[in-house]
């Protein structure tokens, strides 16, 4: 199922996980599934950002501050990455803005 994300959609990492940064990458363990997931440097950055609930527009702003990336490409890749995290039950998705 393809999820639709909007700039004010709030996402957060699920609580049933633990992660560790390994140089420029991250490894996430989903406790309930017992599966490890590896993330590149950009994925690791996003993962660290969503340890607390964040609106997607806030995540995009943080990416733009950290990396030199085109705006439309950034949004497309962020949405793709968030869909992957959602398919793996690694994030919670809430409509609206952050509290």
Image (cartoon, rainbow, N blue to C red):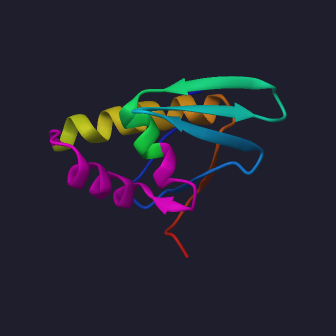
Q: How many marks?
A: 0
Closer-to-camera residue (22/43): 22
- Residue 16 sits inside the magenta stretch: no
Residue at 17 percent across and 39 percent down: it is 69
Outermost residue toward the bottom in this view = 99
Is 21 on the left or on the right of 93, as rendered?
A: left
Q: Position of residue 15 (x, y in %)?
A: 74, 51
Q: Position of residue 27 (x, y in %)?
A: 58, 30
Is 10 on the left or on the right of 15, as rendered?
A: left
Residue at 84 percent across and 34 percent down: it is 32
Outermost residue toward the front in this view = 23
The quadrant holding residue 19 is: top right
Q: Which residues are magenta?
A: 47-70
- Residue 67 sits inside the magenta stretch: yes
Q: Compared with residue 40, is residue 11 higher up or lower down, i.e. above or below? A: below
Quadrant of the image containing the C terminus: bottom right
Q: Position of residue 55 (x, y in %)?
A: 45, 61
Q: Compared with residue 93, is residue 99 higher up or lower down, i.e. above or below? A: below
Residue at 57 percent across and 34 percent down: it is 85
Residue at 49 percent across and 38 percent down: it is 82
The quadrant holding residue 17 is: top right
Quadrant of the image containing the N terminus: top right
Closer-to-camera residue (45/89): 45
Q: Position of residue 25 (x, y in %)?
A: 45, 31
């Amino acid at each position: 199922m393809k999820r639709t994300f909007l700039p004010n959609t709030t996402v957060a990492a699920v609580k049933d996980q633990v992660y560790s940064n390994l140089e420029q990458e991250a490894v996430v363990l989903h406790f309930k599934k017992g599966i490890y997931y590896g993330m590149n440097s950009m994925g690791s950055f996003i993962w660290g950002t969503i340890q607390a609930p964040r609106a997607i527009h806030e995540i995009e702003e943080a990416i733009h501050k950290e990396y030199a990336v085109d705006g439309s490409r950034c949004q497309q890749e962020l949405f793709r990455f968030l869909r992957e995290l959602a398919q793996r039950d690694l994030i919670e998705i809430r409509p609206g803005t952050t509290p």
